[in-house]
Amino acid sequence: MGLDSVELVMIVERHFGILIPDKEAEKIRTVDDFAECVYAYVATNPYSKCKSQCLFYILRNYFSANYNLSYPDFKPSTNLAVLFPIEKRKEMWEKLENDFSLKIPELGNKNSTIGHTTCLDFFLPTKPRPSVETFCVRDLVNWILSLNHEKLINIDNLFSKEEIVRIIIGIINDKMAIDVIEIAPHHSIVEDLGIN
């Protein structure tokens, strides 16, 4: 494990109030492995409410009330381009963020990039930022939970391992400065996310 990985483990340990033995920490390869390791040391409450389900229904009500979108048209698999038509996308995206007072990812388009934007680009080139068209409502719910985990997920009343995944992704985003849309549970912490 490199210094960044050790620092990340320590941050997660402090956040959850746990200690992960070194032998177990060394086995962590992916974000999901990390969540599985934390899951072994924290209590979950299956009678608690699923935060992703609650947020999904809140968003569905919001889009129905504000944009006359019918309930059947708002599903976890609904493409974000359907919810955010190109001609109103920026305005609607900002309105959503303001109305909920929650962080949402920066709106991407086909010309925007993720990564470095300095003279270091020669050595560390940027990559195209995925556009809204490549994502669905499920992704939006997960991003919002990850970016706002401290506000939306009570670690003393966790519903499932999935909520631990959302918290770890939020911590990686915040502490390691990796865009939340670039982090998925199956990603390798070293190879995919570059955390050595």
Image (cartoon, rainbow, N blue to C red):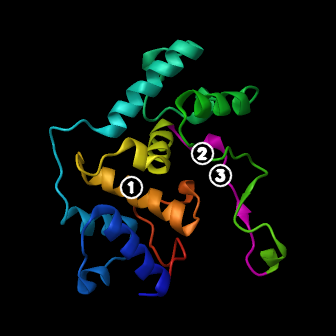
Q: Which residues are magenta?
A: 123-136
Q: Secondary structure at mark 1?
A: helix
129 in the magenta segment: yes
Q: Which residue is mark 1?
A: 167
Looking at the figure, which quarter contains the N terminus?
Answer: bottom left
Mark 1: few, some, or many residues within 10 Å (few <14, many ≥20)? many
Q: Secondary structure at mark 2?
A: helix
Q: Is residue 9 above or below residue 83?
A: below
Report, in whole angstroms, how far the alpha carbon at label 2 lies from the one at label 1. Answer: 23 Å
Horizontally, residue 85 falls left or right of residue 67, namely right
Q: Which residue is mark 2?
A: 134
- Asked if disc 1 and disc 3 are in contact, CB closer than 8 Å, the reply is no
- Asked if disc 2 and disc 1 are in contact, CB closer than 8 Å, the reply is no
Between 161 and 45, the one lying in front of the other is: 45
Mark 3: few, some, or many residues within 10 Å (few <14, many ≥20)? some
Q: Amino acid at mark 2?
A: Thr
Q: Residue at x 69, y 47 (%)?
A: 108
- Asked if disc 3 and disc 2 are in contact, CB closer than 8 Å, the reply is yes
| Residue 68 x, y percent position in the rendering | 56, 12
Q: Is residue 27 above or below residue 181?
A: below
Q: Earlier in the sequence, mark 2 or mark 1?
A: 2
Determine which quarter of the picture holds residue 50. Answer: top left
